[in-house]
Every structure is written in structure tokens, then in C-alpha cells.
Image (cartoon, rainbow, N blue to C red):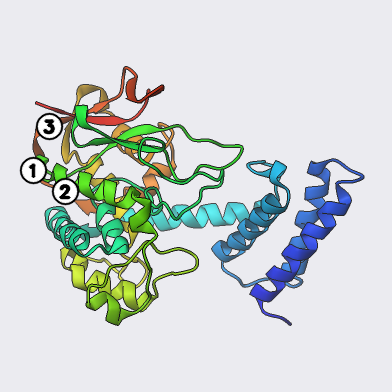
Amino acid sequence: MPSLNKRSIEAVDECVTVFKKLRESSDDAAALCVVGKIFHTKLFPTASTAALHTINNHYVKLRKELSSEFPDLRGSNILPKMPQDLAKSRKDMEIQTVNSHIENPIKINADLMLSKALRGLKEGLADKIYPEVKLCMSFLCCIRSNDLNPKFVRGNGQTPQIGVTHEWLDDYDGSFIMLPSKQKDGTNYKAFSNVTIVKQEFYPIVKEAFEFLLDHANAKKHCYCSVKEYLARTECGATSSSCEWSDRVTKKMIERLGFKEAVLEWNGWEEKEFINETFARRFVACCIHKEIIRFDNNLNVGMLAADICLGHVVGSTATRTYLRYNVRPTQVEGVILKKVEKPIKWAEGKEISTGLYLQQT
């Protein structure tokens, strides 16, 4: 029997062809229901031992291909998804994993981690190594891996750009406007304000990194994939599907930056947790939740501050999956974390009404 990946490629191609024919004589919902069944049968003709997240990833590929071939389907909730029983099992497994993380958390020296990130940020900026700056920045602001990457074309065709999707708020130093990278046709997420968690003395270098990452010229510089060039501190542009850093280069970067030195206790997760932008995003959310910046009174309830900084709906169960690390950061002096109550204008004809911002005390 062909490999799972080969079966997946063949099944996706067949499903696109079948859907194109079916939609001529039936509505899209009915046609896609048939397509979903065909896909699963082709992919798993016998009982599967594939991991649930692997199965889900193949369905993601199918939805992406259908959306690409039929743009009017982008963002539609009728696109095929993995069967409900498998989806429920996957959700239950995710909950169990999060519970295990919370019961046996990775313990991090937050102050040391921030120090490592700031040092790495300074060196990355000096040597113009885009992937290094991006990773270090992820430990200082609650951003997704590609939120600031101009090489990442969003689902709705948009690319990050200062004044269009992002802006540093000089009137609220340490705060910035961001439009999430998860934008896609059919679901457009609104811009909101967010903050950095560093001390005020480091705001200038964080702002410099913010502007460096959003500079298309920096992102489009030559990207290499060799350890030798990285250790030689050769300038490097943003990674993309055409130039992905190998595990060897990434591990060498993690080693050089010394991030693992800030992990006090892995609690059995060292082989399962990778230090990357997702790890960093969780770290920042945990620091916010543990009040690395003193909360204004209207944030001092539940997981509200973490919800907002992550860009989640207030009360989202997804926030809990991020608050899995044991951190005790030293509180930043001289600033207070506030929730946007009145609209903040950030560009001509643009304003935001949600988010977090910093105010000096």
C-alpha cells in the first residue's frame, strides 16, 4: 500500500476533481459531504494507527487545496473536517496533554529568559539575522511566528506592513498595534493593541526590532540554511517555504542563545517541547498572567489579560493551553497594564477599540 503522504496527495487531487463535477448538480454542502467521505476512505482504507493530529493535518491540506481551487469556499465552515468521533478523541487528548503540562509544568527562570532574549535580539539586529531577531522578539511580545514576517502571505493575500497592519504607539510607549497573521478570506480578525513585557529601558531596542522585522528589504535578503553561515554570523533574510532552516541550524541557534539555561526544570517535557516561537508565545502569556506588569483594576480578574494579549475571545478555553509554564517574573516598575476602553487612533482613518496598552505611573 502506498505511504500515507502519497495516498493523501492522490486523495486531495481526486477530491478536487470530484467536487468540481458534483457541484454542477448539487449544492456545495452536499457535494463537500460526499468529498469528505471519499477523502477519508481513500486515506484510510483500513483502520488507521496514524496519530490524530496527523489525520487532522491531512484534512487541513484538503481544505487548503479546495480553498485554493475554489476561492469562493475560503473561510467556509462546510469544508471537510475529520470525522466527529476522531475530532472528539483529538480534543480529549489535547485536554489531557494540557492537564499533564499544568500538573507537571516546565519551570522557567523568567528574568534569565528575558535577559537571554534581549542579548540575542541585540546581536541579531547587529548582524542582521532575521530568524534570530524574530525568535528573540517572540520572547518579548505575545506574537505568532509570522505576525511580523513580510514573507508570509496571509490567507486573504495581505502581508505585514507598518502603517497598514502594524504600528508602534509612541503615545503609549511599549505598546503597538497588530493585525493577527491568521487573517483569511471569510474571517477577518480586527487589529488590536498589545505590549512588550520588558523594562522601559529596553523599549528602544524592541521598537528597533519591530521595525526591522517589518522592513520588507530585511525580510527579502538572501536566506541560507547552513550551520557554517549562521556561526559566521552571515546576514540572513526571513525563512519561508522555499528556505526553511533545518533542525541543525535551529538547534545551533537555540544553543548559542542559551535559552535552555533559563529552564530550571523540564519535568519530563524536554524531548516533547521545542524552544521556538510557539514556546515563546506561551512564555509571554504566562508572564502577563503572572502580572509581570501590574494590572489596572479592570484586568484583575480570571485570565482576562492573557486572553487579550493572545488575541483570544474573552473567556476562551484556548487560553488555558498557553498558561502551562511555571514562571515568577520580577514585576516591571514604573508602568501599569491597561485595557483599551476608549478607541485609540493609530493611523489616518484607523482606530482600535480592543487590546492592552502601557501607561507610565
Query: Which residue is painted at 22% across and 78% down in the image?
Result: 232
| Residue 137, visible in the rendered structure | yes
Give the CA distance from mark 3 to mark 2: 18 Å
Where does residue 317 sit, x and y in percent of width and height?
A: 44, 40
User: What secondary structure is found at the residue carrying circle 2?
Assistant: helix
Reply above or below: 146 against 251. Answer: above
Q: Which residue ends up furthest to the front in the rendered image?
A: 217
Where does residue 238 sit, x and y in percent of width and height?
A: 37, 61
User: Is 68 placed left or right of 14 in the picture?
Assistant: left
Reply above or below: 25 against 239. Answer: above
Image quarter (top left, top right, bottom left or bottom right) of the C terminus: top left
Tag 3 near tag 2, CB within 8 Å: no
Which quarter of the picture shows residue 350?
top left
Q: Which residue ends up furthest to the top in the rendered image?
A: 342
User: What secondary structure is found at the residue carrying circle 3?
Assistant: strand
Identify the residue position indicated by label 1 in the image: 201
Query: Which residue is painted at 32% across and 36% down in the image?
Result: 167
| Residue 105, visible in the rendered structure | no
Where does residue 252 sit, x and y in percent of width and height?
A: 27, 76
Identify the residue position indicated by label 2 in the image: 205
Reply above or below: 94 against 228. Answer: above
User: Is 283 placed left or right of 217 in the picture?
Assistant: left
User: What secondary structure is found at the residue carrying circle 1?
Assistant: helix
Q: What residue type is labelled 2?
A: Ile
Q: What residue type is labelled 3?
A: Val
Query: Which numbered disc, 3 or 1, marks the residue closer to the eye?
Result: 1
Q: Which amino acid does label 1 sit on?
A: Glu
Of residue 217 and residue 334, the one placed in the foreground of this image is 217
Identify the residue position indicated by label 3 in the image: 335
Which quarter of the picture shows residue 276?
bottom left
